[in-house]
Image (tube, rainbow, N blue to C red):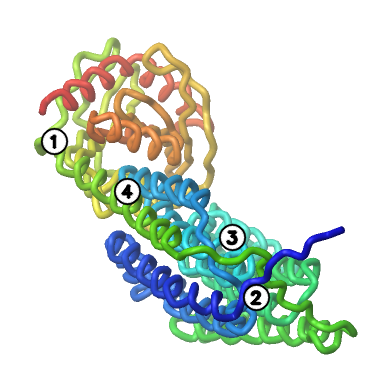
Amino acid sequence: MNQALPMPSATATDQGWRLALPAIVLTLLIIVVLFRDTALAMADIWLRSDTYAHGFIVPPISLWLIWRMRASLAALAPRHSYSAIVLFAAAGFAWLLGQLAAVNVVSQFALVTMLVLAVPTVLGWQFARRIAFPLLFLFFAVPFGDFAMPTLMDWTAHFTILGLRASGIPVHAEGLRFVIPSGSWSVVEACSGVRYLIASVTVGTLFAYLTYRSLTRRLVFVGVSFVVPVVANWLRAYMIVMIGHLSGNKLAGGVDHLIYGWVFFGIVILAMFWIGARWREDELDQGVPAPAVQASTAVPTTTVPSLLAAVCTVLVGGGYVFALWQIEHRLAPEVSQIVPLGPISGWQASAAPTDEWQPKYQDYAARTQATFEKDGRTVGLFIAFYRNQDHQHKMVSSTNVLLHSDDPLWVRVGSGTREMVFDNRDLRVRTAVLSGPLSTRMAVWQWYWVDGRWTASDPLAKIYTALSRLGGRGDDSAVIVLHAVEQRPGDSDAVLEDFARTAGPAIESALRQTMGAR
């Protein structure tokens, strides 16, 4: 004989919510206050970047989605979950690593994750599962997506060039720049279409959730919202170049260039939603009633554990903030110059000019730039040293690059990686080929030094920086760039490898001595 389980009374559930609701609201507010620097950094990006301005409306949309479900949510008995605190602590540690490595996006994703996990901590996993989409939608508030910009720019340039050639227009292309009979064009950041992609995916995901009930249809529409803006941006770029070409460059230049782009994108997105709405799935049209809210099968106990879970959540978050404060107050003395390089066997310092091209690195603590010569070949060396990095002054960032896409003299026409032996160890370096004035071609190699470790990977450089700071060794780092003008296609790689192998010990020694000057 089965024994019926006791059902919570409405009075017991209401009593639980009287304390649980203020507890979760207060917990979320305290988390935002504790991590206010990260939250304000997100808001600052929303304010100054049109690409991420939608971040202002993401939290209100999430709250509205939860409000729509208030009747079914009220029938659930709030229950704390200490297991969620473990996940909350992991998210807090990720936030700490993001702060130590000065990676904004990691810290911001970690903050949103902590806000999301605070809900099951105080109210329970059953409640969190019921509002899973509104909680996950909060991640669209994180300014994320710039990493895709170079790839999207390459795709846009390739498609535009293919379209022009298919239209019978001769094209001479070098990297992201191309010349047609009516003039020259260049694909820059604004042409990448990343803002179209982010806007489409954000709105498309919300549309899919509100319009469909089937998980398959939702996923398909979200996938379409990824593909459509990318293809639409290719067509937009091709159309703008064609309009400029056919009008003698009287149209599709300046402000109307952007206006045409947004108008075309708006038409495409509206068409996508209009077509998607034809397969909408309203609850009343599915032929079956909506599933009834299944009440909890256990009588809610005292709310003291929920309040204790809320207190534990706040204490864990506060612990990470205090840990960061402790680490950030261990600042090393400022460094003004890099220790001079020792002798490099076979290579002589040259008086040749070093300003024909310079890497676009800034906010460094010290810099060395020199030219060396051997057997009639010249190699340029650039080293930028970083210490006491933060979110405004850091080595690895989107603004520290070899070359800006809008550089008036130089253009990147190739890139890749190369294995070499440096300072008696294997190292993979990043390579690039630049084209400059008078058809000059330059080979460029670049990699990082972080706390005695060598890498050409941006993520690894960030990880090494965070681990070094956690270990109390500071964040001393440097970027090393070698460059040489090509006399014959591909001949500069051998010259750069010879110099790197020979100069490795001298560069290593100079950086270690600079790090030791505290």
Residue depth check, mark 4 versus mark 1: number of the one nearer the observer: 4
Which element carries disc 4, helix, strand or loop?
Answer: helix
Q: Which amino acid type is shown beneath numbered disc 3?
A: Trp
Which element carries disc 3, helix, strand or loop?
Answer: helix
Q: Which amino acid type is shown beneath numbered disc 1?
A: Ala
Q: Earlier in the sequence, mark 3 or mark 1?
A: 3
Q: Quadrant of residue 496?
A: top left
Measure the alpha-carbon separation of dots 4 and 1.
17 Å
Which element carries disc 2, helix, strand or loop?
Answer: helix
Q: Quadrant of residue 238?
A: bottom right
- Give the vertical position of 89 relative to 351 (above or below): below
Measure the alpha-carbon separation of dots 2 and 1.
48 Å
Q: Which amino acid type is shown beneath numbered disc 4?
A: Gln
Front residue of 290 and 38: 290
Residue that mark 1 sits on: 332
Q: Earlier in the sequence, mark 4 or mark 1?
A: 4
Could you tell me if the residues under marks 4 and 3 are in contact, i.e. CB atoms within 8 Å? Answer: no
Residue depth check, mark 2 versus mark 4: number of the one nearer the observer: 4
Label at residue 433: none
Label at residue 125: 3
Q: Earlier in the sequence, mark 2 or mark 4?
A: 4
- Name the residue located 27 percent from the left edge and 21 percent from the top edge: 507
Residue that mark 4 sits on: 99
Residue that mark 2 sits on: 204
Measure the alpha-carbon separation of dots 4 and 3.
29 Å
Tag count in the figure? Answer: 4
- Name the residue located 58 percent from the left edge and 70 percent from the top edge: 77
